[in-house]
Image (cartoon, grey):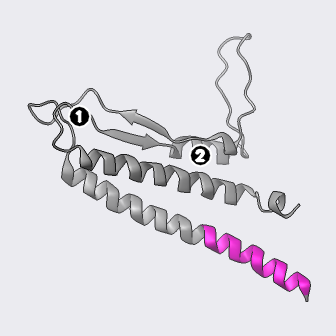
């Protein structure tokens, strides 16, 4: 099937990276919206480390097994999900809020550029498939 053919490691990795950067954008915007909320703790999104490990291990995510009774995992690249982590340890202001608006705006700009680059790479991959399909018809 054509849909299965298009599920290459590269496309799946790009999809997961797009999901992670989109989620990060939501979290950063939420941090910015709560910059003046007393007691609010900023959150961050992590997914790059798992994505890197999965790509280096051929699309599989190995789990560390420390005991013979532990389950072995068959997690794949498709199983990666962005993790939201709240930073409860720090406080920048007296009201307990730890959002630095300048840092958040910088992260938002950086994340937007990353998202645009990922979209461009995804489109390039699809254009390659389109070229192969169109040339195959001739």
Q: Position of residue 80 (x, y in %)?
A: 61, 41
65 horizontally vs 112: left or right: right
Query: Alpha carbon of mark 2 to alpha carbon of mark 1: how far?
Result: 29 Å
Q: Report the disc number at residue 56.
A: none
Q: Residue furthest left?
A: 94
Q: Which mark is residue 40?
A: 1
Q: Give the quarter of the figure containing the N terminus.
A: bottom right
Q: Position of residue 30 (x, y in %)?
A: 32, 46
Q: Position of residue 97 (x, y in %)?
A: 18, 35
Residue 55 in the figure: left or right of residue 134 = left
Span of residues in magenta: 122-137
Element on which disc 1 rests: loop
What secondary structure is the stretch in magenta mostly built from?
A: helix
Give the side of residue 3 with respect to residue 50, left or right.
Answer: right
Residue 124 is a magenta residue:
yes
Q: Nearer the viewer, residue 10 or 31?
A: 31
- Image: 104 above or below 91: below
Residue 89: quarter of image: top left
- Residue in the picture at 64% in, 74% down: 124
């Amino acid at each position: 099937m054509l849909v299965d053919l298009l599920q290459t490691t590269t496309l799946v990795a790009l999809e997961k990276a797009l999901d992670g950067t989109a989620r990060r954008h939501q979290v950063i915007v939420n941090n910015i919206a709560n910059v003046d909320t007393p007691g609010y703790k900023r959150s961050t999104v992590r997914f790059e480390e798992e994505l890197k490990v999965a790509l280096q291990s051929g699309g599989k995510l190995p789990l560390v097994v420390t005991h013979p009774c532990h389950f072995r995992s068959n997690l794949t690249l498709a199983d990666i999900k962005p993790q939201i982590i709240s930073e409860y340890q720090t406080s920048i202001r007296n009201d307990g809020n730890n959002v630095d608006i300048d840092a958040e705006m910088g992260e938002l700009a950086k994340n937007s550029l990353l998202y645009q680059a990922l979209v461009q790479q995804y489109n390039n991959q699809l254009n390659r498939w389109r070229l192969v399909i169109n040339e195959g018809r001739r």
